[in-house]
Image (tube, grey):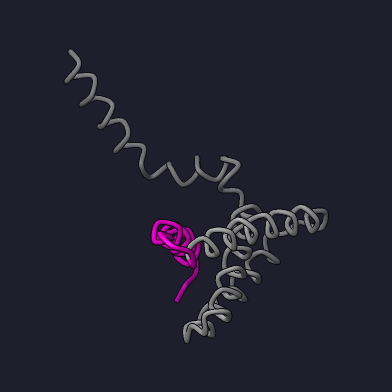
Amino acid sequence: MGSLHKTVSVLCWALSAPALPLVAQTLPHTEPLHLFATCTGRLSALLEYQWLVLDPDADATEARRDAMAELLAAAMPPEGASRAMDLRLQAKAAEAQLLQQALGRNGAWALALAKRQVANCTALLLS
């Protein structure tokens, strides 16, 4: 019976997959304002880190950060500016802390997490 239940669950999930983006739009963490503000903050922190370590990819990161900021501006309702800035600063501080830990000894996990978070953000952008 457990195997049948699992099969039916997987089948239902597979059939509902096209509807998942619609459902995801209603979740708080996928709200465009939250998503774009968080990603803009993360990219800002990465850009500052790259400037610090003289990373040649800083120009590309700056372009991605600017593109994300444009998405944020487009998604922002008139009354959302202060909330967006708060979300952006919180994400920037958190990402900067990870990147600071990456500079220390045994910081490989922090750098990997920071890169994964930024990759999730840059995946939202068209090349």
Considering the whole magenta stretch, tell me its main secondary structure. Answer: helix
102 above or below 59? above
Q: Quadrant of the N terminus?
A: top left
Q: Residue visible at 64% across and 61% down?
A: 92
- From the viewer's side, name the closer residue of 57 and 78: 57
Q: Is residue 125 magenta?
A: yes
Q: Quadrant of the C terminus?
A: bottom left
Q: Residue visible at 62% across and 65% down?
A: 40
7 above or below 112? above
> What is the tally of numbered marks visible in this picture?
0
Q: Which residue is outermost to the top?
A: 1
Q: Residue visible at 39% across and 61% down?
A: 108
- From the viewer's side, name the closer residue of 35 and 18: 35
34 above or below 119? above
* Quarter location, residue 90: bottom right
Q: Is residue 100 magenta?
A: no
Q: Position of residue 109 (x, y in %)?
A: 40, 56
Q: Residue visible at 56% across and 73% down?
A: 49
Q: Position of residue 82 (x, y in %)?
A: 80, 56
* Magenta-highlighted residues: 103-127
